[in-house]
Image: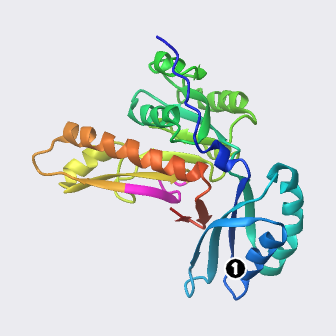
Amino acid sequence: MKPIPAKASKTDEIKKNRARMLISCPDGPGIVAAVSRFLSEQGANIVQSDQYTMDPEGGMFFIRIEFDLPDILSHIEKLKQDFQAVADQFQMNWSVHLAGQKKRLAIFVSKEDHCLLELLWQWHAGDLYADIAMVISNHEDMRELVESFEIPYHYIPVTADTKAEAERKHLEIIDEDVDTLILARYMQIVSPQFLKHYPNRIINIHHSFLPAFVGGKPYAQAHNRGVKLIGATAHYVTEELDGGPIIEQDVERVSHRDNVDDLKRIGRHIERIVLARAVSWHVEDRILVHENKTIVFI
C-alpha cells in the first residue's frame, strides 16, 4: 500500500507569528484592559478575543486571546516573563501557546477503527493541525492501516496481570515526545498512576451521552432502557470512570425498532465526529478546565 503523507496546512503562514493566551482568574474590573494594554505595549495585535464570566456563580473569569507579534519566537520568553506581573495582580492561572507549534498526539486504539480513521483523515487533509507521533494498540489489527500513513505503530498487549508493565512501556515509548493522548475507542481503563503524567491531556470518547450509561456496554444499557436518543461524549480522563470534564457531546434519534447492533452502527458516526471536534479544539487551545467543567471557546 502506498504511503499517504499529511498535506501541508494552508494556515502555516498565518500561524507563524501568532500565539494564544488562556487565562482564568477571579472576576473583577480591569482584567481585559490590563491584558490588552500589556499586549499593545509588546507590539502585539489582538486578532480574536473570547471571554466568559461565571459571576455570580463562583465569580471566575475566563478569556482566550489570539494575537500576532512579529518575530514571535524571539520575543515569546520575554513576553511570558513580563506578563507575570499582570498575572500576579489579578491572581491569574494562565498559559501562552504558539499557534504554529503543532501539538504531538499519541492515539490509543483497540479493535474498532472508526474514530482512528476520522482523526487520520482529518490530519491527512490538513484539517487537524497537529502531528500524530504514533498509534499504540493492544491489538495488531490496525498496523497496516496506520503504517500506510507512515505513522509508527506500537503493539503492546494488555491483560489484568500485565497492565502495570504495559503502562510502563507506554510511558517509555511516549517519553517527552507527545503532548496529548487520544483514547480512540481504546477499551482499557487507565490507571491513576498513569494519569498523573498527563493531567487534562488525555481525551477519551465514551459511547453514550454522559452521565447516562457509564461503564461497559452502554448501547446495551441504552437499548434495555428504551431510550429515544443515543449519544457520544468526549471528555478528559480522570480517576473517576467516565467522569472527567466533558469537552463535546452529540446525539442522534433512535426508535423502538433499533436493536443493539443498530444503536452501535448509528453511534459510530456520532463517536467519530464528537472525538474529532474535541481533539481539534484541544490542539487549538480552545479549552479551559475549571474544577470538573470545561469552558470551550468555539
Q: Extreme left residue here?
A: 257
Which image quadrant is residue 90 in? Answer: bottom right
Residue drawn at point x = 79 percent, y = 55 percent: 70
How far across and down, in percent of the image, does residue 195 sit? 64, 46
Is the residue 68 above or below the residue 283 in the image? below
Residue 190 makes an appearance in the image: no
- Residue 151: image x %, image y %? 58, 23
Q: Nearer the viewer, residue 25 or 185?
A: 25
Report which quarter residue 7 is drawn in. top right
Relative to 26, residue 184 above or below:
above
Query: Which residue does the image show at 63% across and 79% down from the upper left?
Result: 60
In this image, 52 relative to 197: left or right?
A: left
Residue 150 picture location, percent across and down:
58, 20
Q: Which quadrant would residue 269 be assigned to in this image?
A: top left
| Residue 164 in sight here | yes
* Magenta region: 240-249
Q: Which residue is mark 1?
A: 32
